[in-house]
Amino acid sequence: MKNNTSSVILGTGSYIPKRRIRNEDFLKNEFYDSNGKKLEKSNEEIISKFLEITAIQERRYVIDEHVTSDIAYFAALDALESSKTDKEELDYIIVAHNFGDVKEKFKSLDIVPSLAARVKHNLGIENPATIAYDLPFGCPGWLQGIIQADYYLRSGDAKKIMVIGADVLSRISDPHDRDSMLYADGAGATILEAKSSDTNQGILSHSTRSDTLLHSQMLFMGNSYKPELAEHGAVYLKMYGRKLYQYALEKVPQAIKDCLDKSGVDLKDVKKILIHQANGKMDDAIIERLYKLYGLDEVPEFALPMTISWLGNASVATIPTLLDLILKGEMKDHDLKSGDLIIFASVGAGMNINAAVYRF
């Protein structure tokens, strides 16, 4: 690898769907447990508890006509425009997602051709050397795409790479499972370029771990909790929430610290932590534990920018969308300038965890 080559962010883009789904929109749902028994608590109680635990008040859904590759394309257009990048100069387009293009009426997996190929086609890119491929890696997919891009850029194999995270979770969530209130739709795109520099900019370090032996089934596809629908054979996203919560608290803080140690950066010098947002309470607990690993009792104010209250959990789109909002001045009390250090971190299906340290 070329030690004087860094992977730097050239520009970002995002697509936030217009349909706002508030918690009260779930009041009419029938909720069941995993055994197919209707929950005894009222929906008011269920939703109130959900808000208390997750901090989610609303989330965004795509309109019926859009699928994942559509919103990935919208985010890509935004990133190209904001970065003033010639689309024909892209060496790679990497699209992280989990469920392909799931249509509103025919909810089956559609990943042929790949979503990256569809995005490249929709962008009208003629260059056959723009390599387009997909990366299914759970919620950490966008960040794993960034990590792969860093290897390409530092090796000299590429000069400019677009990494997109896009998912439409609203179509694979079981409306009779309380967890369905977590999920949202969205897309975020990031363009990185190779830059020769001695200023130690860009990606300073990254790391990934996969705990599949014991934890691969904490997120999985299963039948609806409503018995009548379960008989139809359709599958939806399911999870063991309590086990996942405990796993994240035990493993994510140390994984982030390992990445920081690898970069030679101290947590006290980090301005922002951009973490995947699946549960507001869980993220707060993860970051508190991270700071305690450094002997710090308090998380600095504004260190943890959050969008979960109004965007919900959009899986791979969460971090790139958050980054785009900050860089474009759309997050109150949050900004980034030259020299600032940030951490990216994510955890999700697999179970996979990754982290990266970045200097602007």
Image: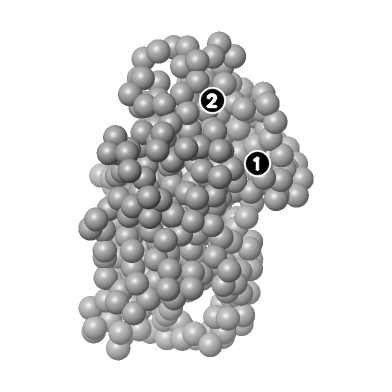
Q: Quadrant of residue 297?
A: top right
Q: Where is residue 29 in the image (x, y as percent from the top left)?
A: 49, 85
Amino acid carrying label 2: it is Gly
| Above or below, comparing residue 194 to residue 175 in the picture | above
Label 1 CA crowd tier, 10 Å (few <14, some 14–19, many 20+): some
**Residue at the spot 42% in from the left edge and 80% down from the top edge:** 176
Q: Quadrant of residue 23?
A: bottom right
| Above or below, comparing residue 169 to residue 27 in the picture | above
Residue 343, visible in the rendered structure = yes
Q: In which quarter of the image is the C terminus?
A: top right
**Residue at the spot 30% in from the left edge and 88% down from the top edge:** 228
| Above or below, comparing residue 88 to residue 341 in the picture | below
Most foreground residue, 352 or 340: 340
> Mark 2 near mark 1, Cβ–Cβ under 8 Å?
no
- The residue indicated by pointer 1 is 327
Amino acid carrying label 1: it is Leu
Q: In which quarter of the image is the N terminus?
A: top left
Closer to the chain start, of discs 2 and 1, is: 2
| Above or below, comparing residue 219 to residue 190 in the picture | below
Q: Position of residue 31 (x, y in %)?
A: 45, 82
- Which labelled disc corresponds to residue 335? none
- The residue indicated by pointer 2 is 202
Q: Position of residue 180 (x, y in %)?
A: 46, 71
**Residue at the spot 46% in from the left edge and 86% down from the top edge:** 30
Q: Position of residue 289 (x, y in %)?
A: 58, 39
Q: In which quarter of the image is residue 225?
A: bottom left
Q: Distance between the residues labelled 2 and 1?
A: 15 Å
**Number of numbered discs overlaid on the protein picture:** 2
**Residue at the spot 37% in from the left edge and 69% down from the top edge:** 172
